[in-house]
Image (tube, rainbow, N blue to C red):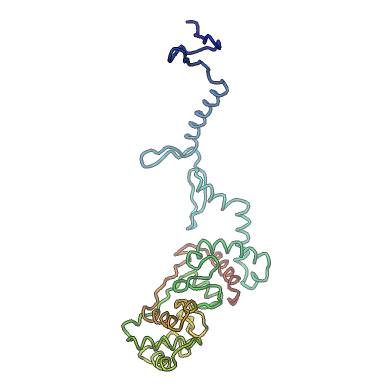
Amino acid sequence: MANPVKDPLTGAETTGHVWDETLQEFNNPLPRWWLWAFYGTILFTISYWIIYPSWPIGKTYLKGMFNNITYKTDAGEEKSTHWNMRALLAHDMQNGSEAIKQQEYLAKVGAASYEQIAQDPEMSSFVRSYGVSMFGDKCAACHQAGGQGVVGQFPNLVDDDWLWGGDTATMETTIRGGRLGFMPSFKKTFNDDQLKQVASYVLSLSGEPADKVEAAQGQKIFQGQEGGCYYCHTSAGTGMHSQGSANLTDKIWTIANVPAATTPETKLAAVESVISNGVHRQMPVFGKEGRNLSDTEIKVLVAYLQQMSGGATAQ
């Protein structure tokens, strides 16, 4: 074996490579501990590829050695799958100590009446904590996080004015089966004068400023066969829960944004637009055939909405 080349100035061993006559490459091997650590990372990587999901193979991938994670799908089916973070999270959320405690409280709430829930501090607290999360997931996208809704699109849930009824049984029916809000368009039924007259009468029902002559003519159309508005809104204009028709006398506006209008003309235009274009909006189904809320979860959501609005009647 040839003697190692050493740098004449430092005496350090070199590789023998020289540049520009004096620039040399020292032969400083890596520390042994660093090499073992490097080899360890390679061994760890290979082990990880074998044990956990890793490399793609065709249309699938290596699924690892663990295939015993069991959890329930949203549809309630029990599913066993290979190790992955999503399945592990679902399993932990359904089988962890907090999840078991949560299931116990759900069962307790499911067996109680709405009056008992409201009177029990622990159940009320659970409804608030569980309900706010469920409301955020299922309802807030339309009704907003605080339940204020969006005028012209989604009803306000905190004003104690429920189009379909605010008792607990009706609220359950609404959430479970959804609702179809519909009012026909009168664009081709009324001419411009008639449209203005009916809008004036509607404004007058809630005490808003309106031309008395126009409103009187609008009342005849509203109450007569020409308009037939009383069929849904009643002759008093108070609406009907069975039809989901709005109460026009309570100063609560769900479609026409009258409160935001600053002049009598813009208020009139807002109401005219609704009468002319009609209303068509759909609330989705949240029961087992829709968004898969269980009966108990629907009950918790109703109890939460009661707390939020402070006005639903427990029945």
How far across and how far down the image is residue 115, in percent? Answer: 64, 73
Residue 1 visible in this rendered orientation of the protein:
no
Relative placement, left or right, of 51 versus 273 is: right
Between 1 and 285, the one lying in front of the other is 1
How far across and how far down the image is residue 147, in percent? Answer: 54, 69
Question: Which residue is at a point 39% across and 93% down the rendered structure image?
Answer: 217
Between 306 and 22, the one lying in front of the other is 22
Query: Residue 104 is drawn in which quadrant?
Result: bottom right
Question: Which residue is at a point 54% across and 77% down the rendered structure image?
Answer: 166
Query: Residue 223 is drawn in which quadrant?
Result: bottom left
How far across and how far down the image is residue 138, in percent? Answer: 50, 63
Between 161 and 64, the one lying in front of the other is 161
Where's the C terminus, which quadrant? bottom right
Up-down: is 131 above or below 313? above
* Residue furthest left in the image: 188
How far across and how far down the image is residue 267, in percent? Answer: 45, 81
Question: Which residue is at a point 64% across and 69% down the rendered structure image?
Answer: 117
Residue 129 visible in this rendered orientation of the protein:
yes
Question: Which residue is at a point 63% across and 61% down the rendered structure image?
Answer: 105
Query: Residue 11 is drawn in which quadrant?
Result: top right
